[in-house]
Image (spheres, rainbow, N blue to C red):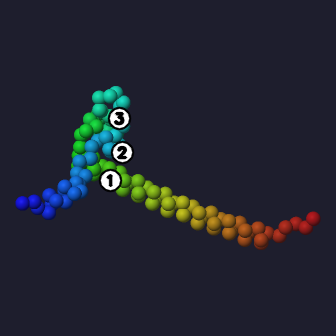
Amino acid sequence: MITQTQIQTKIAPEKTSTTCATCPKFKPTGEGRGRGLCLLSNTMVKEHHPLTQDCRLNLASEAKAKEKTIDTVGKQIKETRSVLEKIKRRSFVKSQLIPRPLF
């Protein structure tokens, strides 16, 4: 008897194994032996090796760190623009208050 899980697997197989070759941190060496450099662990790995849980966790934490950096930089840009606007307003007000010599 075929179960529901087996039917779903036959219709649309799940993508369970992702290999080192599909990882964004994998750089092939180009030597023709199916090896490359893993930039996460700084070691030589085979293209066909499946990604480990450590790799998945490191990729996820790296993505979160990038998002946090982007948010921080965005906040700094907003603060800088705000300060620049205040400076512009102050210099405009000062230029209006300083009497100019008549020539």
Q: What secondary structure is marked by label 1?
A: helix
Comparing marks 3 and 1, which lies closer to the viewer? Answer: 3
Q: Nearer the viewer, residue 21 or 103?
A: 21
Q: Quadrant of the N terminus?
A: bottom left
Q: What secondary structure is marked by label 2?
A: loop
Q: Identify residue type, mark 3.
A: Pro
Q: Quadrant of the C terminus?
A: bottom right
Dot 3 or dot 1, earlier in sequence? 3
Is the residue 103 above or below the residue 20 in the image?
below
Res 40 visible: no
Q: Which mark is residue 28?
A: 3
Q: Which mark is residue 24?
A: 2
Residue with the mark numbered 1 = 61
Q: Identify residue type, mark 2.
A: Pro
On the image, the x and y values in percent for residue 66 come to: 41, 53
Comparing marks 2 and 1, which lies closer to the viewer? Answer: 2
Is the residue 7 above or below the residue 19 in the image?
below
Q: What secondary structure is marked by label 3?
A: strand
Mark 1 nearby-residue class (10 Å; few <14, some 14–19, many ≥20): few
Residue drawn at 32 percent across, 53 percent down: 61
Q: Quadrant of residue 85?
A: bottom right
Q: Determine contact: label 2, label 1, CB under 8 Å.
A: no
Is the residue 46 above or below the residue 85 in the image?
above
On the image, the x and y values in percent for residue 59 come to: 32, 50
Position of residue 15 in the picture relative to residue 27 (left or right): left
The answer for how far apart the CA atoms under marks 3 and 1 are is 23 Å
On the image, the x and y values in percent for residue 41 come to: 29, 40
Q: Identify residue type, mark 1.
A: Ser
The answer for how far apart the CA atoms under marks 2 and 1 are is 14 Å
Residue drawn at 11 percent across, 61 percent down: 3
